[in-house]
Image: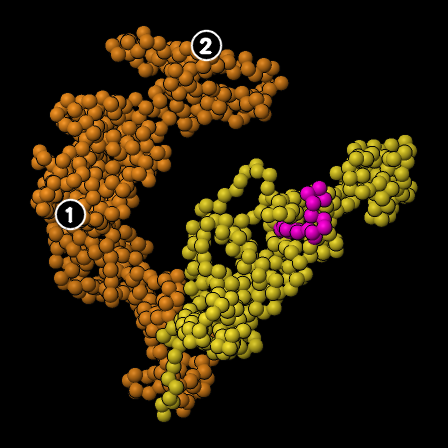
Amino acid sequence: MTDVYLNNKFAGNIKNPEDFVERIINERRMGKLPITINCRHNKKSDEVRIESSGGRAVRPLIVVKNGKPLLSEKHIEQLKKNDLLWSDLVKQGMIEYLDASEEENALVAFSEDELEEESTHLEVNPLDILGLATSFVPFGHYNHGVRLSQGSKNQKQAIGFYMANFYIRIDMDVNLLHYPQYPIVKTLTHETLKYEKHPSGQNLIVAVMSYEGYNMEDAIVINKGSVDRGLARSTYYRPANVEERRYSGGLIDDVSIPDKDVNGFRSEEDYKFLEEDGIIYPEAKVGEGDVIIGKTSPPRFLNALEEFDLTSSSRRESSVALKHGERGIVDFVTLTENVEGNKLIQVRLRDQKIPEIGDKFTSRHGQKGVISIVVPEEDIPFSASGIKPDLIFSPHGIPSRMTMAHMIELLAGKTGCLAGRKVDGTIFSSEKEKNLRKELLDLGFSEDGCETMYNGITGEKYKARIFIGNMYYLKLKHMVSNKVHSRARGPIQLLTRQPTEGRANEGGLRLGEMEKDTFVAHGTSLVLKERFDSDKTIVPICEVCGLIAINDSRKETSFCPVCGENSEISNVEMSYAFKLMLDEMKSITIYPKLKLKGKY
Amino acid sequence: MNKIIKEYVDKLPNKILLDVESALPEKCVDSKIKKIMEEMYKEYLYSLADPGESVGLVGAESIGEPGTQMTLNTFHFAGVSELNVTTGLPRIIEILDARKKIKTNMMELYLKKECSGSKNVKKIAEKIKEKTLESYTKEVIINVADMKMIIALYPKELSEADLTVGIVSKILGKSFKKFKFKVENKLLTVISSSKDDALKEMYKLKEKIKDTHISGIKGISQVLPVKRGNEYVIVTAGSNLKEIMKKDFFDSERIISNDLFEIEKTFGIEATRQLVINEVVKVLDAQGINIDIRHIMMVSDAMTMSGKVCGINRYGIVKDKPSVLARASFETPMNHLFDAALIGEEDYLNSVIENVMINQAVPVGTGLPGLVIKVK
């Protein structure tokens, strides 16, 4: 007897599990049972599990009987004529959806010529074994597997035309590519997903060559002329939200230009962009420190007296201002109400990003790189016909990574561009490289895609012929202007007096323990001391008890709270962190007594 | 030794002097020898570590950096008839931590010349392998009616190990005093001496008796004779130096175990120092990593200089640091601070880490020299 479970609940016993499962599947194919039902006999544990619950991942497959797919050429003809629909195929049991469990007992043929006598299903398209992003990689079957997944990972970070209604949306941290293009070398997935409606890259002219050593280590060289003509420009949108919160006691936030006597008032200058309502106007060009929405909040804690005196002096300033290193133009201002009925102000900032040194680009084959130089157009190498590449890619990126598809795409892109058509690069069923080469030859170009090129600076002919063509390049969302950071002096933390952390806080760059070790290893101990004196303090120490004394700067005297006025007190220089540790030791009842000794 | 070379006895290490002497051509003018020795001395002084050189930290970085590459490419040969020995980073950690129980201990046993024939080796190897009764047992029958257990043994295997059923029964008799062991018809018969619960006892015994050690040396679970150069070496999994040293067919001067504490117990601390070096070098060589041996020698020195093996952790060499702050900055700071407070420990701020903490010049490199003249 075999146990039967329906949606993981015991339903009963049956005698012949094989027949039972076959019947369920047959009834599903005949349309008597819903197509979302899946059923499987687990031979190991000898139980039958039937699933009908939601949330399972299912995928369509062509049903195969006696080694022949039920979907025949005749059906495909009908499909082409629109006499037959996908839903009809499912209804007629030619295509069915399997979940992970039922797939376990299925033998799925990858393609028609792999069909065997025992096969139960056939893949609708070999493309189905790939994920969405991976199927976007053209000529993927020529690539090393690792590069394929890296290429798909990179595509997820590409900036493009993410949504058509972007102008009326307020999204967090989005980028929008100017003049996005549909790839010349496309795949089936690009078509099915209407990629032309939301493309995320541009077709660039790429030359595979070295340029004065500027494209070492995956760096890329980019043409200033192309940049000036708008190549790979993008806009960065970032919102600022403010809500007029209500607090206990009928107190409420107030969006307005803060009064001068408000606690924490910045400076007149910082509020210069605010209009009477306390909100910035559109198209204002703002920079670091500028207030976007002026707001004051009621005090955090009310003492008995203040409760009756709610003048502005007790209120807190809580405006939204741009943090260190941020800039932009106010794009859009909305005034609404949120779910709780509070007044909600949303301001969208925009910032144009022109490609610059440090911006990250990638082809669709995991060949990512960073711009190392933007070369003036006159210095860019040119071909005999006068073509100048938009981007120069280093040939050293190819051998170790074995991304053959990168080069085939370049060739295919060139062919497609010259022939004025799109090239199909769908994985497993792409156009043949041989045909592309022949077409290129027929167009009057060298079949290997190489061209004679001239040095843009000297005008000399290069000895080598340069591989040049069109490629679909993606601009990735990591741009230097969002990341650059440096500091000499700046804010410190209250507790440790050490520099703050992070770019947004204008923080320091941590010299960590291992970095410290390198100074010690070099024996440069005075350099080390200097690097670590960001929290240096001078502490008065009582020489009798060895504890921290008090320095009265008004009377210009020092005294020890333990030993009194008469004890000898010396000033000692130490890191504030150490002083803090001494204090913490006292708090755990340890008496850290400092014994002082002359330095010389 | 040459007169001129002799002058350098206190200045240069003996090994260098001997090397120079053997390398000298037969006829060599004294002035030339003198020149050679002068150059030699200069070179020697030049290659010494400078005062204030942070040898420890440079050593740590020199081992640590290649160590980061190691983690990724540790691999095993699956299915090859080899002893499974821990290598790679896990083994390095094991050595430097001075673990009491290591994952896979092993020995390399060299044989004395007279017994190093290939036939002998196999026999000896089999002999020292630890064997329990189970490996000799063909069948165990419990006769419920007579309250007897009959154990049939493999005669061939017994004779190969120079055993008889009688010897086995004596060995068993020693470890299970509650039962009587007899030999009947070449079969081992066991009778319980206690009356009550005899059957239950018998069943318990049946399981226990399987694991009784019969022959070989305890702890040696696997043996593998390997040919090295002209002679055979027995590589064993599991080690028991004490028992091995008792056997007279092994060359006791070349026996090696990879267990630090066992070596320390049997051969002493100097041998342990060398073992640490050898074992670390062995792992690094296998990974194709080239680290100057002096770094490893210093680590080994640090581990063994106290006369006992100290791991590089808070129970080992960090525990012996004289500075409270240095110990507290490593691990478990509270314990160190409280313990120091209890006995009123004083910290003289003599080493690196304390001075980093209070932001003073660390006493290495440029921070080492001080003013000799006292300013009044």
Q: Is residue B283 left or right of residue A30?
A: right
x, y (%) of residue B294? 48, 63
Give me the C-alpha separation between circle 2 and circle 1. 62 Å
Q: Is residue A358 magenta?
A: no
**What color does chain A have in the rendering?**
orange
Residue B46 on image: x %, y % = 40, 71
> Quadrant of the image for the C terminus of chain B?
bottom left
> From which residue to which does the magenta span run?
B105-121
For image coordinates 59% across by 48% down, the residue present is B229
- Find disc 1 in the rendering and name its residue: A374
Figure chain in yellow: B
Q: Which residue is mark 2?
A: A66
* Circle 1 SS class: strand
Q: Identify the subunit bearing mark 1.
A: A
Q: Answer with left or right where residue B104 lies relative to residue B289.
A: right
Q: Nearer the viewer, residue A513 or A495?
A: A513
**Residue A23: x and y, percent?**
50, 12
Residue visible at 32% across and 55% down? A248
User: How has the structure been colored for display?
Assistant: by chain
In reply to whether residue B116 is colored magenta, the answer given is: yes
Dot 2, how many residues are within 10 Å of its Cα: few (below 14), some (14-19), or many (20+)? few
Please say if the residues under marks 2 and 1 sit with CB atoms less than 8 Å apart. no
Mark sitting earlier along the chain (2/1): 2
Q: Quadrant of residue A3?
A: top right
